[in-house]
Amino acid sequence: MHLILTTGRAVPVDVPVLVAGGGPVGLAVAVELAYQGVRCLVVEPREEVSWLRPRAKTTSARSMELLRRWGLAERVRERAPLAVAWSDQAVFVSSLLGREITRIGGCFGLDLVGSELAAEPGQQVPQPLVEEVLREAVGDALLTGWQVAGLREDADGVSVRIASATGEEREVRARYVVGCDGPRSVTRAAIGARYEGRQDARPNFNIVFRAPGLAERMPHGPAVHYWVLNPAQPGIVGRLDLEDTWWCIAQGVPAAGADPMRLVRNLAGADIEAEILATDPWTARMLLADRYGSERVFLAGDAAHQNPPYGGHGFNTGIGDAVNLGWKLAAVLHGWAPTTLLATYETERRPVAADTVEAAAANMATLAPELADPALMGEEAEFEKVRPAVAEAVRRTKDSEFHSLDLVLGYTYEGSPVVAEGTGERLPHRWLAPGVSLYDRLGRGFSVVGDQSAPGAVALAEQARELGVPLRAVDLPGVPLTLVRPDQHVAWRGEHPDGALRRALGHGPSVSSRP
């Protein structure tokens, strides 16, 4: 049965999962559910994706691995205006057209091409492009021009009220709801959850501008970011494409009275010709929801957590939310996991978000204003005298911001009730052949990786048959057995998998890894 909207669009009256919000995280939830064979409806008020306020510009190596898992990584790279090989540098300058102070290489995992550490390097790409790729993947599961206006949960499901921009209202019934509806989340309010945390007092002013010929005048070469350490106007500038479109963050600038053209020219260090395309004032927030869900309603992305953009974590944390929650919802809906599995979403993902918020806040403690020195703007002798000290301060305070693979690739679910003691980490990556990742061999359900002649492999296969769980065998002769979850995290390793799969699904008592 379907609802017929005034636009003529037919919408199912009953869906397994309804996703509130179709930004990158909501779309990622939908892609993961489709990957696992579960229908959903994504309700999103924006008809089109706007490129005027691109927000995130970095898709992490881990997010790119998950996009690869969905078959979308190559599509993102093909469309990205900046190829991954273009630059992995952050350059610190007196101005865009001024003098270079120092630089940091290997930023954001952009140098991981072919590395054993990851199946994919990071990618500089505007968030709107990622959204467009995800929208295409979601297809007709996306309902635009509508938003979730309210919901009512009961023992059997959730009644969701959706509203159009013209005031039309309809009700859709869902077994589960995922709230990806951002900082002002209706979903979060509906379950009585609230943000905990703080807001930074310093204002910031984002600008997107077009500046023909600016790139040709710059002496610093390609870079991911150019940090301008001019005390009169500190900030960050970067390219959105290899044509004429740029973005910048003017730090410490309140919206009231801001002159975008003057800010751009101050950062450039000259009265360049530019066209202002969009502005976006903001302040950084360090917020975490006190709870991630109820029995049938869950929060993901900005509805659950917000962090400063420094370090490029942004929506990447939300992509991790989407995969963790998505496979668990699918397991429950397919009947091969109990509903108790869903409670582990908060258990596993909230600590990751808390660590990310604190890491981003630490990165924000030292920004361009703190690194700027008036002597950098002086004569050459004065500049050279102070430059080494400023360069050392940059390396000391900003290295972790650009080199955060321990957080991006190294987070773990150790201590979760559904992973064996000493496990929970992302499966260590390895290449099996040129261009063929171990991750490419994993199944959509669980996988048992290692020597399939080991008795434990037979035991896991028997457990999977008893529970009706999809299990793929990935034979690596001589390699100890590892049970891998759908999200590529390790659930168990060892020789004797007594009850390992039952535990991984939230069925029963804990097990331990035994040698």
Image (cartoon, rainbow, N blue to C red):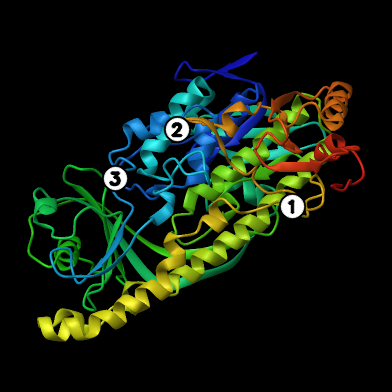
Residue at the spot of label 2: 73
Q: Nearer the viewer, mark 1 or mark 2?
A: 2
| Residue 238 placement (x, y as % from top left) | 26, 55
Secondary structure under the numbered disc 1 in the rendered image: helix
Which label is found at residue 228?
none
Front residue of 203 and 85: 85
**Marks 3/1: CA distance?**
36 Å
Residue at the spot of label 3: 52
Which label is found at residue 347?
1
Q: Can residue 386 be seen in this view?
A: yes
Task: Please identify the quarter of the rendering in which residue 93 is found.
Answer: bottom left
Q: Nearer the viewer, mark 3 or mark 2?
A: 2
| Residue 74 placement (x, y as % from top left) | 41, 30
Horizontal relation, residue 172 to residue 10: left or right: right
Say what amino acid the circle numbered 1 marks: Thr
Say what amino acid the circle numbered 3 marks: Leu
